[in-house]
Image (tube, helix red, strand yellow):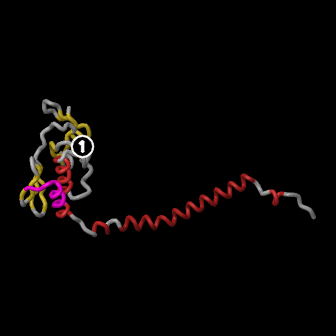
Amino acid sequence: MVDVRCGTCLRQEQWSETGEVTVVAEGGHRRPALDPQWQRGRTALASFVGEIGPVVAVCAGCGQLMVASETTRARMPVRVDTPAGALTVDEAIAGPNGPLSRDEAEAFLRKQYHEGWTAELRQLPKFALFFVLLGPLAMWLFGVMFVASFLLSVYQGPAAPVSGPINW
């Protein structure tokens, strides 16, 4: 049995030597955080250099690439469609203008799907909410410390100069 997994939606299948496929985990609910073609290209390039197992199928749940745990499996050819042309990963990596190295292919994908400074602006509401909620959190912590110190002083009782005898 060979474990085959999708890194995006976490679908897991077990393939037998006779060709029978058993679905262990359905998956299919998650989608890639980046552009689907960019994620597809990154997975194919990582498989090409052996960082992960071979790409053996396309996920039925999310359409991304599935990777086998057994490294002796034959890798399937992958085509990544980009705005500037197709990138193919098979026995070699080829771009729209010819053969590429892995670093050149990664640079090509990064150039095609680069989001620039606008991606940073999408994080702005998250950081604004974080900083707005720091004030109430600080006030709550101050209140907890105030109540804790009050209860501790009640537990310890009054200090000796305060509770001493009164001489008129």
Residue 10 picture location, percent across and down: 26, 45
Specify the farthest residue to the right.
Answer: 168
Three-letter code for the amino acid on which mark 1 is drawn: Arg
Kind of element beneath mark 1: loop
User: What is the total number of numbered labels drawn onto the structure image?
Assistant: 1
Could one spot residue 100 in this view of the protein? yes
User: Can you say whether 119 is above or below 29 in the image?
Assistant: below
Pick the quarter of the image with the N terminus.
top left
* Residue at the spot of label 1: 11
Could one spot residue 63 in this view of the protein? no
Which residue is at a point 34% across and 65% down the rendered structure image? 123
Left or right position of 139 against 113: right
Pick the quarter of the image with the C terminus.
bottom right
Q: Write down the region rendered in magenta.
A: 99-109
Which residue is at a point 31% across and 66% down the rendered structure image? 122
Which residue is at a point 89% across and 61% down the rendered structure image? 166
Residue 105 picture location, percent across and down: 15, 57
Residue 47 picture location, percent across and down: 18, 46
| 118 and 140: which is toward the camera | 118
User: Can you say whether 52 is above or below 103 in the image?
Assistant: above
